[in-house]
Image (tube, coloured by chain):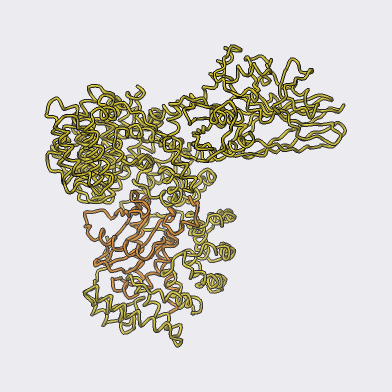
Chain colours: A orange, B yellow
Amino acid sequence: MYISHSSLSLLPSAPAIQIRFILIQNRAGKTRLAKWYMQFDDDEKQKLIEEVHAVVTVRDAKHTNFVEVRQKDLLDAMSFRNFKIIYRRYAGLYFCICVDVTDNNLAYLEGIHNFVEVLNEYFHNVCELDLVFNFYKVYTVVDEMFLAGEIRETSQTKVLKQLLMLQSLE
Amino acid sequence: MSDVVEKTLSALPSLLSLDSQAGAGKLSPSSKLGNLIKGITELTSKHEEETLIKKELESIKEQVASPNTTMRQMKEIMVRAIYCEMLGYQASFSYIHAIKLAQQGSVLEKRVGYLAVSLFLNETDEFLLLLVNTVLKDLQSTNLIEVCMALTVVSQMFPKDMIPAILPVVEEKLTHPKEIIRRKAVLALYKFYLIAPNQVQHIHSKFRKALCDKDPGVMTASLHIYLQLIKENPESYKDLTGSMVTILRQVVGGKLPLDFNYHSVPAPWLQIQLLRILAYLGKEDQGTSEMMYDVLEESLRRAEMNHNITYAILFECVKTIYTVHPKSQLLEKAAECIGNFVLSPKINLKYLGLKALTYVVQQDANLALPHQMTIIECLDHSDVIIKRETLELLFRITNAQNVTVIVEKMLEFLRLTCDDYSTIDLVGKVAELAEKYSPDNVWFIQTMNSVFSLGGDVMQPDIPNNFLRLLAEGVDNVEDRQLRLFAVDSYVSLLQGETAKLPQRFLQVISWVLGEYSYLREEESDPGSVMRLLARLLDQRHTSTETRSWVLGAMTKLCSSPVSVALARDVCERYSGSLNTVLRQKAQELMILSQDTKLRARVLPAEGRLESPEVDSSLSFLDGYVSDALAAGAAPYKSPHQRQEDLVQEKALSLEPYGLSLPVSLSSCSITDRRSPTLLSMSSGLSGNSTELSHQEGSTTLKLEGVKRVWGKDGYLAQQQSAGETPTPLVELPSPLLSPQSPPSQKPSSGLEPDQEKRQLASSLFVGLGSHNSVCLMGRAETAPRHFRRKPRGESSSGASEGSSDSSHSSRSAAVDNLLHSNLLDSTTVASEGGAATTTTPQQTSQRTLDHTTSNGNPHVEGTEQRVEAGGPLSLIRGNGMVAVVPPTHTQTDPQTQQDLHPAPALERPRDLPLTSHLPAELSGLARSEFTPLCSDQDSSLALSACRVYKEDALVLLVFISNNNDSALHQMVLQLTCKELEISCISGSPLKEVKGHSVSVCLHTVVMKRASVQVELAGLLSYQRPLGQPQAAQFSLSLSLKHFLRPLTVSTGDYGKMWLSFSHDLKQNLRLVTTEHQEPLTATLDALKGKLHLHVVDIIGSEGIVACRLLQGPGQGQPCLLHCRVHADSLAVWLRSPVPELPDSLLYHCQKALTET
């Protein structure tokens, strides 16, 4: 599986990492949070952000919360990189998690919800503006709940305890 | 759905003025960040935003560079820089300051520094090296928060090469009293494992400790590592099954603290993780699977609450149940559970239900039956992802009866989609289904027309290739004629219409088919009509140059009637001046061939069109040119095949995980098939294509050997079918017995009244499922005789109903088998003919041939030269091979061994001679080498010698142990070791002792595992004298490649076929041997034959073809072919073999052999 790391570590090839990125966007496509667990270069990131916005915003309530995104492989026109985006809309914000196509859709869908519930608790009835002005705190929440491309902590009480401890430093 | 974010941007001004966000949200809008964000939100255009941020970045740049900026200010600046980066603007000047902040700031500032670093930098960024010391310091800090931060950043990104620097500290944290530190340390190690698995190899025992940690959180974290480890190597972790089952049982049983509950479901993510691990552990392992049946059932039972998260667990559980060794009861329950998904009004669940069905119908197509109506509804769903999944499902349940409806649905989708991936994927699937299950010719041609029009120029090139081959390969019976005629007719009518919209690839297919088969319709229409259509196509602006050259090629085949000739002349005049050289050449060809009827009849015979023309496929006429070029320093040619292979090797890693299609079993074949290296250039448009194709196909199939092919072009392959035949518990499922024609008896519980139309659709889609014998679970294996494709392909080549790729492969492998076994046949010929064998190659040099011809079973060996002369050419193994080691002059025989007359006494050591009498009878007739002394002890009381006997299928190595002392040798053990060789002892029982003054022999068969020029064999003989200490004698023996070579008897035709299928080649010029009474070529080849056991297949003029094989165990062997051509004063040798090392090593020996001569 991991044969030659040295030469190819640049390519997003390691299939092991489950979450490739977490993205929060508003309806206009403005990024509210972008956390990358896999290597992408800046252009790729920008392209992905735009692509996610394009595919996610056109979907309505009748649609599933899952989209499969395929990028043409730069090296080979005939092969594609397969991603799966699991998203959930809360008011004007889209919370998107990009995972491997083989991952469990619902588990991540609920992972998003768990995350939003923590935010709601932390910001006392969260709204988009909380996330906008405190975006760096949102990153902290993300780091507490997701790490190394995996769901790290799912217990809301524990996350909040840790967050409040950090908060108390300020 | 809890819409927790109610407030939107419209509320912005009031919120800002209020500035009374409770809890965490404390932000003054007057702060710089507040101003920036506010400023950006108020802007309306992208352009304005750009200007503003540029300005902001300028000011940030100024501030960070100023020496007066405090860390506190720096923190604030950094947050602004992060914001700009997040919006997609580069602030690369701030990266170094982010690192500085992480290094020097207080805890709070450090946090922002680390955050900025983790957002700005990549794993490979060199800046990260500056962070290593900081991380190390923080890891050792007494402040828990600092340790946490360091561990977080380490799990996020860390330079791979620096892992050893911090690894001990991170390991230490595994025993930290605080649970959160232990958890983060485990995750950091997980990350290390992902990026550099070797580095954490030694701490696997600590992983186990983490798995047993008293805190469930740490245990959960360690499961990430175990999931990876088990996925890669399930065998080594089977012992964990019990623990995993226990953990899952405790979790399911609610034994974890309430903290872990999510919406009152106990630790759902942990359950899912465990289920995935169990799936890997139980896959194809009945024993392990049995351990988990109970807990799987419990999971299914407990997850009954109607919430997304329980469905997530159920989905994983169903997947696991269908992955592990099947148990009928469980499968039944899982199938029921899938039903709940499919019938759910929630679209997400419906989608996952379809996905699960797609997964399980591979095992039992009937499982789709109860859900027909849902599936049909999903076909028309507005969500593309649902449609795609439905088509995928339908694709898997296609059989000969429902193929037309399913293909129609797929084409419908294709017409609407504009996504390249879907097009490529679906077009391939349609083509596959059409070839496999087509009910009749008309449908097939029409479907392929749609495939070509829709697939256009993005589809896999194999599709048109396969299609053309299918047309070309059939025998010339009525049915094939009909098929071709249909094709021709349909293309003529297409060309009569508007051609502007047809993709170029399709036009190329059309021109080829018209060129080949227009003659079939000629009786009924005027001869020039097709020609005129082609000419019209040629002149259209949208026709590409490549297509034009195909059209010209087709015209060349068609210009037989006077009308056509006139038309052709017209065309030639226009195109012989073309700027494009290919077109010009084609136009010239057309011009000449249309005028010279005789030449045309020879080049393009009307009758012989169906037989493949003889082609000098080795392109030997170019060899002179090639060797000249090589001599002039040109790089050796690499075939596209090879180049592609190289390329694939280079990027092997990047390709693997991103297959073309999602289902694993499918992608494995569709990728290999569609992306096979047979992307032959279609522009070599003459009818020779088909032969080339099948040869290339042969090489593809060769490469596929050993790869598990579950699904082939002709449907489920044998193994799959046999899997279906084995009585799996699936059979016991109560399959809903719907007669294929009747509408479904169950109504979907969704409450929708299915209208008549849908019912009809259902019955046509699901026909062929369910009502069939339950043994054949696939529901399609039985349709084999109706396979449209097989008829023309199979019968034409082998008469057996095999796909063409298979048949070409089998004929190839048959050829190889033949090659490998023909020697055996030969040997019987020799035996029966005995001495009556006649010399077939009189020019053979008698001086060098010292052959050991034998009548089978008779140990008597003739040693005279005349005798050898006569038997040489037919003898099984050329005794000439021995000449390399036997002095050519001697014909001396030893009186002592009269009855065992051997011509190989290397007389330097007279003591060796009696050894011949110890040769086992069954070997004594065979060619052998002289005896090589291996070693002896000081007083010569023990001597070891070796001898090689060249058997047909192996090299037999004899080790003679001569005991020249009075006392016997005891407890003897002889060990031979060499990693390049496969050595097996064939002496009946391992000898234990050798009496005084006697000789014992140990026999070993030796074959080479991998071709190499020369290998060193190490030997160790341990023994004991009575009253003595155990002693050991060491020796070594070198064996060269030539000892393992055997002639490969093939016909010239077979040689040609093999030549094309071998991928590794090598060219070199060698010295020619000159003798007085022989042609240099013959002399050289004879020399090679003599020294290296090669088989000279044929000598034609100045070229000779030679074949040999390298022993690789009984019945196996790796062939190597040599093509030699006299060029000036040297011999241009071109070697080809399926194994990369063989040509290289063989060439070395050829060179050596010729230099020695």
Q: Position of residue B97 (x, y in %)?
A: 45, 77
Q: Position of residue A120 (x, y in %)?
A: 33, 68
Q: Position of residue B770 (x, y in %)?
A: 27, 30
Which image quadrant for residue A123?
Answer: bottom left
- The C terminus of chain B - image quarter: top right
Which image quadrant for residue B697?
Answer: top left
- Vertical relation: B1145 (above or below) B202: above
Q: Is residue B1140 visible?
A: yes
- The N terminus of chain B - image quarter: bottom left
Image point (31%, 81%), residue name: B55
Judge from the rendering whether residue B621 lies leftward or rightward of residue B589; answer left or right. right
Q: Position of residue B992 (x, y in %)?
A: 76, 28
Judge from the rendering whether residue B205 lies leftward or rightward of residue B499; answer left or right. right
Most foreground residue, B962 or A153: B962
Extreme residue in the bottom direction = B68
Which image quadrant for residue A148?
Answer: bottom left
Most foreground residue, B1119 or A73: B1119
Marks counted in the figure total 0
- Vertical relation: A75 (above or below) B616: below
Most foreground residue, B586 or A85: B586
Q: Is residue B750 visible?
A: no
Most foreground residue, B670 or B643: B643
Extreme residue in the front direction = B1076
- Vertical relation: B510 (above or below) A140: above
